[in-house]
Amino acid sequence: MEGMLISTQQALHMLLTGDSELWSIVMLSFSVSFKAIILTTPPAMVVAYSLANGNFPGNKIVLAVFNSLLSVPTVVIGLLLYVLLTRQGPFGDLRLLFTQTAMVIGQMMLCFPILVALGYAAINAADRRVKETSITLGAPWWFTMLTVLYEVRFGLLAAVLTGFGRIISEVGISMMVGGNILGYTRNITTAIALETSKGEFAQGIALGIVLLLLAFMLTAFLTYVQGKQEITA
Amino acid sequence: MSEPLLLFRGIEKSFAGNQILKNVNLSIYPGKCILLSGKNGSGKSTLLKIIAGLETPSKAEIEFSGKSHSWKSVIRSIRKNIIYLHQQPYLLSGTVVSNVAYGLRFTHLNRTQRSDSLKEALEWAGLADVANKQAKTLSGGVQQRVAFTRAWILKPKVLLLDEPMANMDYESRMQACDLLKRMKSEGMSIVVTGHDADIFDGLTDKHFHLTEGKLES
């Protein structure tokens, strides 16, 4: 118990004094996950909109596949990507294994089904009149899509924040395709895993605090946004 | 009477094996107003949405310029001239101005023409005072006027109104009726649904009743 207290004290000290190694790991985590969420959101929203509004054959099957992908373990995605990017793999020539790009791709694969499934739920709940109003006023299909997405923006924002929370806290993909290289691919979760295995708890606790603070901030922001939605509805 | 602007022939629509519309024929004449009445669930809204291209019929043909076409083949091109207004209009997030201007960006008007058109429309409907207010915060009557103006500014040939006076107080009804009369006097064809013909007194030229999926005059 005493050791735990000492480690926590050291963790707080590292956080408050701006420990450069710790904060570079935090920044790397945010950089990778921001890129992944920004690159994934537009195509995921188009797919979600198409699923919510399209009557193409197999629509429900595709949706069921995306819902199933929500529960795929991150290590499985990491393994799949590893096999694809390894020297002997089909994309080995790209030399992406153990790079931030590989981590971004892996996190995109993880959050894509989340954004599609949650985006679909938000778009499907949209008032039918939004689409009809847009069409009858002469909007082309893509502008109607943008209008519907804008009208359900609070629900979509919740989906994006949930996706971001999921990818910044994942460890399997980052460990397998990032390789946990200090200063290059070591992020919050892989650093926590490494430091804990070494018995060095201080940095792990400090990074854990950052993740917890992030979770609280995302939840608080979501609550605020949902309150705003109720006011404007 | 002159040639009809659009003639919808043999409209049929079924939902889950239940036939809502049975061989409905409807002629829309330029500058004339048709009132469609019928019980709740009789298919009035469905009929308007089929005309507007928002609902797909089981079967329908459209005749214009002396030629008959299948609904599917021409609806995309003719719906540019048709605007449908919901019973409870949906105003998009934003101000009255942004709502009224919504459809203008899809026209061939340039920026100056759009701005002039917008000013004219706000004046026309008496909305200049609330132009910069959030549309969703306005009363039901004013929201309906915003919806009318949003349609009027695009100068459609046909305006389809689904029970526009429902849930309106007397004053709002009078204002809405006045706007509709002005639209009609400008040559717009109007098809309106409602239960009470008296509300549309002085506006309608023809009255049809929809019963058991069939249109009766």
Image (cartoon, coloured by chain):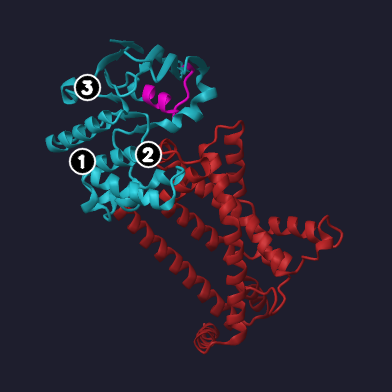
Chain colours: A red, B cyan
In terms of sequence position, does the residue under pointer 2 or pointer 1 come before the other? 1
In terms of sequence position, does the residue under pointer 2 or pointer 3 come before the other? 2
Chain containing the residue with disc 1: B
Q: Which residue is mark 3?
A: B195
Q: Which residue is mark 1?
A: B141
Chain containing the residue with disc 3: B
In terms of sequence position, does the residue under pointer 3 or pointer 1 come before the other? 1
Amino acid type, callout 1: Gly
Helix, strand or loop for disc 1: helix
Along the horizontal axis of the image, is A93 left or right of A63? right
Cα distance, mark 3 to mark 1? 19 Å
Q: In this picture, which residue range is highlighted in magenta? A: B46-62
Cα distance, mark 2 to mark 1? 21 Å
Answer yes or no: is residue A86 visible. yes
Please give the name of the residue rendered at 24% of the width and 18% of the height, measured from the top-left corner.
Answer: B205
Nearest to the eye among marks 2 and 3: give it: 2
Residue B138, above or below A57: below
Residue A95 drawn at (x, y percent): 81, 66
